[in-house]
Image: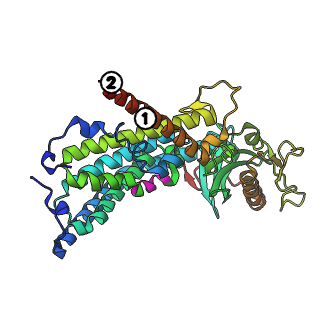
Amino acid sequence: MNAEQGNTPTADDFLKGLWRENPVFVYLLGMCPVLAVTNSAINGLSMGLATLFVLTLSNTLVSVLRNIIPREVRIATFILIIATFVTVVDYLIQAISLELHKSLGAFISLIVVNCLILGRAEAFASRNGPARALLDGLGMGLGFTLALLCMGGVRELLGNGSLFGVAVLPAQFQPWIVMILPGGGFFTLGVLLLLINAAKARRQARAQTLEGAS
Amino acid sequence: MSRPEIIASDATPRPAWQMYRAMVGTGIFCALLIVAVFLYTLPVIERNRAAALEKAVLEVLPGATRFRRYDLEQPVYAAFDAGGELAGIALEAQRMGYQDTIRILYGYDPARQAVVGMQVLESRETPGLGDKIEKDPVFVDNFTALDVRLAADGTQLANPIVLVKPGQKTRPWQIDAISGATISSQAIADMLRDSTVRWVPLLWGMRSEFSADEEAGDER
């Protein structure tokens, strides 16, 4: 990354996380919450939003402090910052809804070790200005949230016949229990990755034939 | 600022005070932030907890409109109906389930000598299988009139609660297990049995001491 472009925030800082560099479907980062908490759409969505919150704030703070954090202790400092925001989120979620806190369980505290957050702090926020780091955090967090929402939606629909707790499939539908068990997480992620990669490969092939033709 | 100076610079060792400054400074800032958020959210969280408990107590004791906490060896919640009559007593029980400790609140009605309601307060049982202890209508129905009658001498239960195979409940003190969630059902049955064996004779003996008036306990 060219250091000279360091300070002007661009739309791409935000947009790249949504699709082209989606942390889940492209980088395969943060698989633990992706597989574990997406057994319903609401769980996926809230986990995504919690991560979005932590990622955005930690990215910004890391970026603000990047010039006074010596290289030798950077990882420790990043983790300290991330853990702080995770604790903040933990309290906020308890204040918003105990039910939600109950269903996300241990996974809120595990946001600390979500490699996506440390990865963005190290790879982006510590090298770029706060405005860009903020946009990067928002974009990546939103990409993560969308991915978790997709996973949770598919799994809840097939595993429970409902979406956001509202039954949408007819009562005759026999839910595929496996989809809300851990195994279903792997199936869903595998199938989604397959579809996304197939779409990409097709687009690439089309681009190549166009080039070949011209 | 052409280039992030410190983090990106090559490996010249930094003086130690810079590392102290970074870590201690960040640490203090983070500590203050956490304390501020904690103090700000604490009253809300406590209100949520109290509301959840209140809802659970009133739900396990049909007909109850208010309740009061008595601190015996464990807190028990005596609930009263609109006329100030004792509607029943709610108490907590817990035991290891399949994944983690399951905590429940159940209501005991001395007038009917039965467990009249049960709510799961905390459980991390497998979604789709073990978590049916909260939702499965047939299973939940076990706890609307679960007999915990005292034996003639009044010191122990005539029939301790037992778990039976799904659909084989024939006696009012039996609990129908959920098929596919035997361990979770067993945990519920065991914690109810242990708790009722210990508490029902005690609560029966002191049933007339619970009162809706102000004399004892904390009004909730």
Badge number at residue A72: none
Residue in front for this viewpoint, A95 or A150: A150
Query: Is residue A109 inside the magenta stretch?
Result: yes
Tell me which chain the residue with mark 2 is part of: A
- CB atoms of marks 2 and 1 within 8 Å: no
Residue A213 numbered tag: 2
The amino acid pointed to by label 1 is: Ala
Q: Dot 1, crowdedness within 10 Å: few (<14), some or many (≥20)?
A: few
Image x and y of residue A26, in percent = 40, 43
Of badges 2 and 1, the one in the foreground is 2
- Location of residue B61 (image quadrant): top right
Which residue in the protein does label 1 denote? A201
- Report whether B124 appears left or right of A206: right
Query: Is A178 in the magenta?
Result: no
Q: Position of residue A139 (x, y in %)?
A: 31, 40
Q: Is B173 left, or right, of B202 in this rendering?
A: right
Q: In this view, does B163 lie above or below B13?
A: above
The quadrant of the rendering that contains the C terminus of chain A is top left
What percent of the width, then of the height, locates residue A137?
A: 30, 45
- Residue A119 or residue A42, whichever sits in front: A119
Q: What stretch is highlighted in magenta?
A: A107-112
Which residue lies most toward the front here? A213
Between B196 and B84, the one lying in front of the other is: B196
Q: What element carries label 2?
A: helix
Q: In this view, does A12 lie above or below B2?
A: above
The quarter of the displayed image where residue A213 is located: top left
Answer yes or no: is residue A45 visible.
no
